Image (spheres, rainbow, N blue to C red):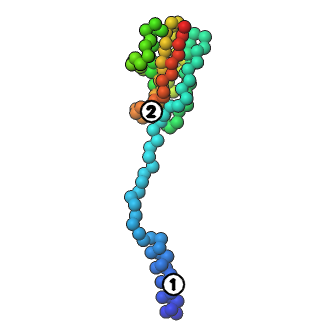
Amino acid sequence: MKKNRILSFFCFSIVFFAFCCGVKTPLKLPKKKTAHITHLKAEVMDKKIKLSWICKGRVDKFKILRHQAKIKEVCAGCPLSLKEIATVKDKQWFDVDIKPGYNYWYQVCPVYKGKTGICSEQVEVVIP
């Protein structure tokens, strides 16, 4: 009887120390995924420009940024001053405030709980 108890205790100890012993690493919390915009497209339709995009991550709304310049005034490498022109909840938006003879640059930024995520690449549209 004592041999069975000793043997049981010995087996239990081996199993216990094999699985419960050792150096523990700190608990790693999952990283928060920052929302980001991909595949921003701009299409000219009638007298408006349709923007559409794909968003990955949690989003409350989207900021639409735009820069416009006359075609004659556009220079390669000149800095763009993108300004927020709209805030939307959908993954598409129509810019109806366009004029012939201008270049338009757009960028879309996701917003979640008041924080701006990773914005899209800029896309350019020329209206001759």
**Circle number at residue 118:** 2
**Disc 1 from disc 2: Cα separation:** 59 Å
Instruction: Give the residue type that dot 2 points to.
Output: Ile
Q: Residue at x 56, y 13 (%)?
A: 48
Q: Specify few, some or many for label 1: CA neighbours under 10 Å numbering under 14, 14-19, or 20 or more.
A: few
The numbered mark at residue 64 is: none
The circle drawn on residue 8 is 1
Image coordinates of residue 54 in percent, x first then y, are: 55, 31
Rendering coords of residue 86 (x, y %): 46, 20
Q: Earlier in the sequence, mark 1 or mark 2?
A: 1
Label 2 neighbour load within 10 Å: few <14, some 14-19, many 20+: some
Image quadrant assignment for residue 50: top right
Q: Is residue 12 above or below residue 109?
A: below
**Position of residue 17 measured from the top left corner of the image (x, y, whole percent):** 45, 75
Please, is residue 44 above or below residue 27 in the view?
above
Which quadrant, please, contains the C terminus?
A: top right
Image coordinates of residue 85 in percent, x first then y, are 44, 18
The residue nearer to you, when weighing 19 against 100, is: 100
Which sits in the foreground, 42 or 62?
A: 42
Residue 45 appears in the rendering:
yes
